[in-house]
Amino acid sequence: MKDERVLVYSTDGSMPLPKAGARKSPAAQQQNSVPDDGVIRVFREKRRASHVTLVHGLAPNEIDATGKELRRRCGTGGTTKNGVVELQGDHREAIVAYFTERGRRVKKAGG
């Protein structure tokens, strides 16, 4: 009879540990990057049980002011960090309309 047991964990140090960041494949890392082509991209992301709207592609000098205006316009909370405006909830349509009124190029992306 063949022994089908598989070693799951060992304290003797014989099992190699995964390297930091080894979980994401190169394709997944490339998918998360946003090109810097002057187009504002609006994404929706699901976190736990709620949705978050992300706005990428804004110039560093306009992120804070635009984030504040979008939060006021959508009537929701949010933050600006790492060059991205995050709004609580799914507000893609309102954000696309906001930038379209101002003559900016904008794309709505993400599920």
Image (cartoon, rainbow, N blue to C red):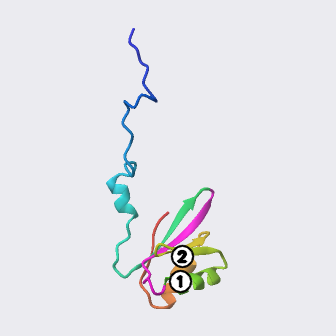
Judged from the image, the secondary structure of the residue bearing numbered disc 1 is helix
Is disc 2 in contact with disc 1, using a CB cutoff of under 8 Å? yes
Q: Residue at x 59, y 83 (%)?
A: 68
Q: What's the magenta region?
A: 49-62
Residue 64, numbered label: 1
In percent of width and height, residue 49 lies at: 63, 57
Residue 22, numbered label: none
15 left or right, relative to 9:
left
Q: Nearer the viewer, residue 82 or 68?
A: 82
Q: Residue at x 57, y 79 (%)?
A: 94
In percent of width and height, residue 12 lies at: 42, 28
Give the position of the N terminus as an image quadrant. top left
What is the C-alpha distance between the residues marked 2 and 1? 7 Å
How crowded pointer 2 is (Cα within 10 Å; few <14, some 14-19, many 20+) is rated as: some
Q: Residue at x 35, y 77 (%)?
A: 36
Q: Name the kind of residue labelled 2 in the image.
A: Thr
According to the picture, the residue beneath numbered tag 2 turns out to be: 80
